[in-house]
Image: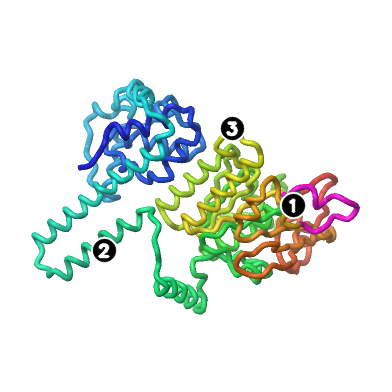
Amino acid sequence: MPSNKELESAVLSVILDGRHRQAVHTARASITTPLAFHERNNRIVWIAICDLDDHGHAVDAGSVAELLSRQKFHDTITRLKRLEFGERASIPKFDDGYDDSTLAQLGGFAVVSDMAAAFAPAGSLPRNVLLLVDLYGKRVLITKLREIADKAELTTDGMPALLDVAGQAILEMGRGVNTSQLYTAKQVWDETAAQMLDKANGGEAGGVKTGISGMDALLTQMRNGGLYLLAARPGCGKTSVALSICMNACMRGDGVLMFSLEVDRTDLNKKVISSLASVDFRDMDAGRLTREDQAAVDAAGAEFAKWPLQIMDNSDLTIGALRSIVKRRILEKDDVKLIVIDHMGLLMGSKKDQNEYEKVTEISRTLKVMCRELRKPILCLSQMSRDSEKGDTPRKPRLSDLRSSGALEQDADAVVFLHREGGDDAYRDISVHVAKNRFGPTGQTSLKFSPATMTIGEDAPIRSGERFEKMNSEPRPGEDLF
């Protein structure tokens, strides 16, 4: 089978060296499976690299060796077999003598250290990765052709049936190859007509609605492959609106992957539960709930636990690591319909010496490429500059208020600004301004926000009694619950 041991060593050595921060991101952009490596030990080391990267840890020979020292060899081999042969693969039974750490079975730290010490220029990594993936593709092709040849010898089916099997096998392989493709006008029209028919029948043609009617009237939906920017000054409700969109999506059964770089996952959960249960956030956070409130919280928590929602609250995340995590998650199980990032300003670039303009430009471009590559909508929260607050009368935000880089305005398919207009103690009036919309009109709508229960709505919900009074209690001096 086609393979190149030296090529595999060259790829791993640059990553394990630890000095090239972008190396893992570059490699994972093309290497989507450990099976791209032909050598067993290299596959094992690659899995460890991906595990570290998925959790936001730096990757080098020492961190990989430490992780392998905590993994049982039998578990590692089982994982490899599952990848190679599927979930129903027959897993070998190991003697007690093999019940050791993966690092020990590989030959100790020296093996990983030797991989890192192998000479390989970092500048050759992109080309070496492509060559490695190409060899893997050839191995898969050879295996498929052998299976087809065996079937041709043993089956009584005629040529048309065999050609259908062969064509389907090659087509499935082609879907995983990242190549540019030209489409005829007929192919484009057929695809467009199918999307229009799906929408006419009540479907969303793969997109995700915000669940906020005013925004959906302007955006129609967040389209697959679209980058949506939600921007505001601090205290205007970005996270609350984003959570409301996530809640609406999850309650429709759409899977959501949320990266919260600013707010802890338990605090996010409290905001959601407060809204679902109509219970004062501060009472819930302080643990002073009545029996009635506790019952409402428990019921809301049970409902929340069923949602197709995943949250990562790592505050030290690079754009490369985020891309790797999302891509791997979707490749493993394609049930994610919406990706939410809160917020862009806390993401880190690939280089430590980048200025703010370079960092934001890189992040914006990478997010745009992710949208197109994965065919998923991304909702990214962003801060605005202080320009909109200058003067005696704060003006409404505009595209030039986006912070640090014109790339945000250029790459986003839609830019939505939030602007606080006023309100009273019970509800705050929030203006929603769609300042850019690549696929529809711009315009404005309005929302109301209940600070007590973190509830976003277009009309103030009608409630009565004691719970209504608690929900609308005035925030304490100096306190902002956004």
Give the main secondary structure of the magenta stretch.
Answer: loop
What's the magenta region? 384-397
Label 2: which residue? 168
Tell me the CA gap for discs 3 and 2.
46 Å
Tell me the CA gap for discs 1 and 2.
51 Å
Label 3: which residue? 352
Mark nearer the N terminus (1 vs 2): 2
Mark nearer the N terminus (3 vs 2): 2
Label 1: how many residues lie within 10 Å, few (<14), some (14-19) or many (20+)? many
Q: Considering depth in this image, is 91 or 31 the residue closer to the camera? A: 31
Q: Residue 171's quadrant in the figure?
A: bottom left
Q: Is residue 202 left or right of residue 86?
A: right
* Residue 388 in magenta stretch: yes
* Residue 230 in magenta stretch: no
Where does the image place residue 287, in percent across and percent down from the top left?
Answer: 70, 46
Q: What residue type is labelled 2?
A: Gln
Q: Considering depth in this image, is 250 or 241 the residue closer to the camera? A: 241
Q: In this view, does 287 lie above or below 166?
A: above
Q: In this view, does 207 lie above or below 263?
A: below
Q: Do the residues labelled 1 and 2 touch (CB within 8 Å)?
A: no
SS class, disc 1: helix
Mark nearer the N terminus (3 vs 1): 3
Label 1: which residue? 401
Residue shown at the point (60%, 63%) measured from the top left = 248
**Residue furthest to the right:** 392
Q: Can residue 222 be seen in this view?
A: yes
Q: Considering depth in this image, is 153 or 183 the residue closer to the camera? A: 183
